[in-house]
Amino acid sequence: MDMKVAKKKLGIKERYGHMTRGLGWEPTYQPADAVFPYDKYEGIKIHDWDKWVDPFRLTMDAYWKYQGEKDRKLYAVIEAFAQNNGHLNITDARYLSAIKLFWQGVSPLENYVVQGFARAGRHFRGEASRVACQMQAVDELRHYQTQAHSISNYNKYYNGFHSQRHMWDRVWYLSVPKSFGEDALTAGPFEFLIAISFSFEYVLTNLLFVPFMSGAAYNGDMSTVTFGFSAQSDESRHMTLGIEAIKFLLEQDPANVPIVQGWIDKWFWRGSKVLALVGMMMDYMLPKRVMSWKEAWEIYAEENGGALFRDLARYGIRPPKGWADACEAKDHISHQVWLLFYEYGGAAAFHTWSLTNEELDWLSAKYPDSFDKYYRPRLEFLRDKHARGERVYQSTLPTLCTTCQIPLCFTEPGDPTKISHRETVYEDEKYVFCSVHCQEIFCNEPEKFVQSWLPVNQIYQGNCFNPDVDPTAPDFDPLKAVLEYFKYNLGRDNGEFEGSEDQRNFAMWRGQASKN
Amino acid sequence: MSKVFIIVQANEEARSIVEALLQDNPHAVAQESPAMVRVEAEGKLTLKRATVEDLTGQPFNIQQLHVNLISISGHIDEDDDYLTVEWAN
Ligand SMILES: [Fe+2]
Ligand SMILES: [Fe+2]
Ligand SMILES: [Zn+2]
């Protein structure tokens, strides 16, 4: 019998090796290509799956241990927040619009990413990549669930948080993140990985989860900052994986480089458009502001993304095609998107408002090259009209970009006074775009994007009314009928903040919190 | 040279991580924002287990960083005794 020798504990690298290597097998009942039917058709060539390494080398036991610890901390905060009326400690009820938009438009994306990684984990051949995808699917499910649990506390008191699942499939502005997620989910597994792990998580999510969440803390929302940072700690792993995944693909075969570059071009641009919503949340919806969207873009996109692309240059990868245009847009997009939502405020399930002079001054200081020249006069004009009792609401529907589905509200690179507009005719049908980059994405995959479910077009085709509605009735109000189809509580979820139920309730409850 | 960063939550557990980073990486700077601390440095940052243990007098597992980590940039090399983030350019 062998003598038991006291063995040194395995190190991280050895444990990770045991966890992720030698677990697979060659199938014998079916050829491997039948078991893994989707990991070749995109043209990506993988010669050695064992070169895939997760740099954090988290093994399953450590994963559950640390995730459990994160959840315990998070749920302690969520509970304390609910028990102590934490919602009355936020700066101002206007802040809630940002959380409504987060819940309506960001949380459902977490669920899409669960599905995407569960699928990628099934379809990649390498065991290490499958373990990584499996962990990430579980992480993203945790993100959705913790967001639901945290935000449900607001749903007890405030409007616009209900019917998330219903709204996601119908509401016009939610088709922006929804189409982004569905484009990724219906791509092949490698494109999905580049879209989500690399372009979205590595290059862009810091913008959402770092400065915005710090802003949530600054505005007294302990619940949101805690779920935000808890999710972002998982994102650190996902980002690391994103950069590993891209190195892996680029090192496996030089033929992968142009394919990957095409995906980087597409997904960086798509992601930057979705994040225009976050720009508005940071610059306009946080009553107390930590940093401007522009500053956040400079730190997390330009500086950190710039470092990344300098690093990837050795593989022959260049910065994404839309890079310069996206960087120029940092001076404009948050203002353009806010003006859009302000004017379509009747059709959004959150509130919009006029800014105070101090807030306008803050924006003037943060945006010296654009705000006073292009946006402040318009905001003051709208504020004056509101003060005269003529709150502006647009009632004609905007043209949507076929690719990103954002109404045409962005301006030409180099000319912030001119709305950017492109058109392509494909099979006798005209398609409209917000930019050359969205146009190019369409032209690369027209069969996919002709299927875009564009809310405005669907409304005009009569597909967005409840079944019992009679559009031929003499008193038929189409806008009202559409908002009912969205399940809005009219006059409570939508419209101007000033005079809203949320404003009144918050003021009343806060008053009760400080006296008997 | 490109900058790398490690961002952690502004709490008691992570305070020793920030202190260890500043101690072992003299070129690093810490910036505080609401609820978070961002440590950034040119080129490279290393977190050493031994330094955190010296500061707290308690055993520290490098992977405990995950509990209070918010974000990170650069290529990562992690082993039992250290974690390094670095750009190759
Ligand atoms: Fe997530
Ligand atoms: Fe993620
Ligand atoms: Zn577009």
Image: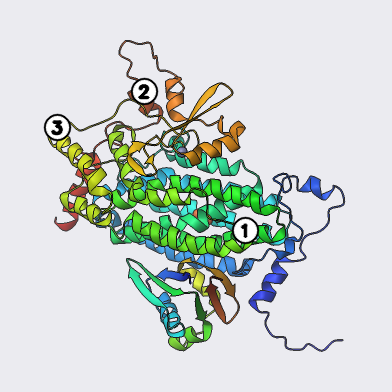
Chain bearing tag 3 is: A
Residue A270 is situated, as x and y percent measured from the top left of the image, at: 49, 45
Q: Report the residue that reaches farthest toward the left.
A: A388
A362 left or right, relative to A280: left
Q: Residues within 10 Å of mark 3 (few under 14, many from 20)?
A: few
Q: Residue at position x 43%, y 66% from top?
A: A73
Instruction: Read off the residue under disc 2.
Output: A481
Residue A389 marker = 3
Numbered disc in front, either 3 or 1: 1
Circle 3 — which element?
Answer: loop
Q: What amino acid is found at the position of numbered circle 2 in the picture?
A: Ala
Instruction: Decide which of tag 1 and tag 2 comes sooner along the chain.
Output: 1
The mark closer to the camera, 1 or 2, is 1
Query: In the displayed structure, would residue A469 be above or below residue A15?
Result: above
Do we see residue A78 in this rendering?
Answer: no
The amino acid type of the residue labelled 1 equals Gly
CA neighbours of label 2 inside 10 A, class few (<14), some (14 to 19), many (20+) = some
Location of residue A274 (image quadrant)? top left
Depth order, front residue of A513/A114: A114
Q: Quadrant of residue B11?
A: bottom left
Where residue A59 is drawn, which disc sits there? none
Q: Residue at x 53, y 53 (%)?
A: A199
Residue at 35 percent across and 72 percent down: it is: B31
Q: CA distance from mark 3 to mark 1?
A: 58 Å
Task: Name the one closer to the observer, A332 or A285.
Answer: A332
Quadrant of the snapshot with the N terminus of chain A: bottom right
Instruction: Please give the residue where the numbered disc 1 appears in the rendered image.
Output: A316
